Image: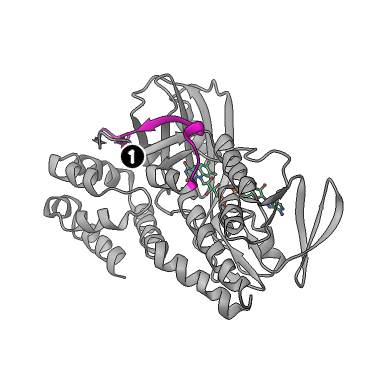
Amino acid sequence: MVGAGPAGSAAARACAEEGLSTLCIEEHGTIGHPVQCAGLLSASAFAECEVSKRSVLNEVTGARMVSDLGGELLFDARTTKAYVVDRCLLDREMAERAADAGAEFRLKTSACGIRGTTLLTRGVRGREEIPFRLLIAADGPRGSVARMLNLRRPEVYLAGVQAEVPYAMDPRYVELHPNASPDFFGWVIPLSATRARVGLCAREHAGDHFARFIARYGENSLHLVSGVIPLGVMPQTYGHRALFVGDAAGFAKPTSGGGVYTGVRSAKHAAAVAACCARGEFDDGSLQDYERRWKEDFGRELDIGMKALHMRQKMTPEDIDRLCRTLNDPDLIATIVEHGDMDRPGTLLRRLALKPSLIRAMGILFASGVRQILTG
Ligand SMILES: Cc1cc2nc3c(=O)[nH]c(=O)nc-3n(C[C@H](O)[C@H](O)[C@H](O)COP(=O)(O)OP(=O)(O)OC[C@H]3O[C@@H](n4cnc5c(N)ncnc54)[C@H](O)[C@@H]3O)c2cc1C
């Protein structure tokens, strides 16, 4: 295993639980550090991590979408829909669970090359050559293992910037600001009634967009985070005795940038395939089963999410304002509350596509765009 983020630790734990001899190497000396995340996990994403609630800072029941041109809507499921977590603690506990299951961790050790079935590393123990039967690449957005194997990597990279600031807000609701960024969105995530994480992602000039956005909330930041999110899955997520999981494969959700849910799910599929292969061969034909499994699980949702992102990128600030105002209707809000799922947006889109009031207000181009997302 290369990388001890959520995907790497989940894979390490599942492999060790399958009885496989498992080594996880991590270039940093502290797991979970530096944090590059807003820490918002849907209830199901958090459940997938299989840890205690030690890392949970807040629970949210809904969201407020604000167009910043006057349009606004609030939806509240009145039950916990998502957790705001301390990613450092979450990652550490996931690694602890993997170690409890029997996985070995080697910190301050960086993968720097692959020769056949030997991983070349350098770190606190100097240069090492570690033989492997299967390599699980959980090395995040930088994707050094894919580069070592000359495999094509995800093509689109979003830059994210976020600050933790004092801010009074209702801690039950996350705020979404689609117009804070021309091609993604901004967020205000409550840590408590008096503190929030304020951030955004963008393809270009993220720093400039962030400077404008954060100015509304004050710049008294005690924690500044920046990082990249790869979008669009690499063309082949297996090969040369390696399986790619999490951000290393480009599994972050295009509608939210969240990558923990798909990262951990992909890790569990990779471990299941590793266990099957351990009883036979690690050839590409056997490893291919990994791609079949994750596609069957969340492949369609990633496709739908990517098309929805392209559609969002064509919308003007005025279109988004109109969408906010139109969705602010009791029937549509009830649909969002009932069918909204941060990890699987397809069901909600399908339901909304059937709503005549939405189609009337947003126009025929919007309607055909939604149809294309769902059928194309
Ligand atoms: C600003 C921002 C906000 C985000 N907010 C959210 C959110 O609210 N919810 C959510 O679900 N997701 C969010 N994400 C995405 C989320 O952080 C990632 O999808 C998630 O961390 C991916 O997990 P991973 O284990 O695949 O990779 P990572 O968490 O990136 O872990 C990869 C690990 O591999 C190690 N590594 C890399 N190269 C090597 C090497 N050569 N040798 C050894 N070790 C190596 C790294 O040090 C790292 O520890 C956000 C991302 C950003 C940038």
Q: Is residue 55 magenta?
A: yes
- For the residue pair 342 and 207, the one nearer the viewer reads as 342
Residue shown at 47%/34% (left/top)?
53
| 325 with respect to 52 (left or right) | left
Residue 195 is situated, as x and y percent measured from the top left of the image, at 46, 22
- Considering every residue shown, the one lying at the far right of the view is 126
Q: Is residue 31 left or right of residue 73?
A: right
Rendering quarter of residue 329: top left
Residue matched to label 1: 81
Left or right of residue 122, residue 366 in this image: left
> Quarter of the image containing the N terminus?
bottom right
Residue 295 rendering spot, x and y as whole percentages? 43, 67
The percent coordinates of residue 71 (x first, y second) are 25, 36
For the C terminus, the quadrant is: bottom left
Q: Which residues are magenta?
A: 49-74
Q: Is residue 205 something that shows in the picture?
A: no
Residue furthest to the bottom in view is 285
Q: Position of residue 359 (x, y in %)?
A: 16, 55
Could you say which is closer to the camera, residue 311 or residue 343? 343
Judge by depth and name the residue closer to the eye, 11 or 203.
11
Q: Is residue 134 magenta?
A: no
Up the image or down, 301 lies above or below 102; here it is: below
Examine the image and state in which quarter residue 115 appears: bottom right
**What secondary structure is found at the residue carrying circle 1?**
loop
What residue sits 84% from the left and 57% below the top? 128
Residue most toward the front? 19
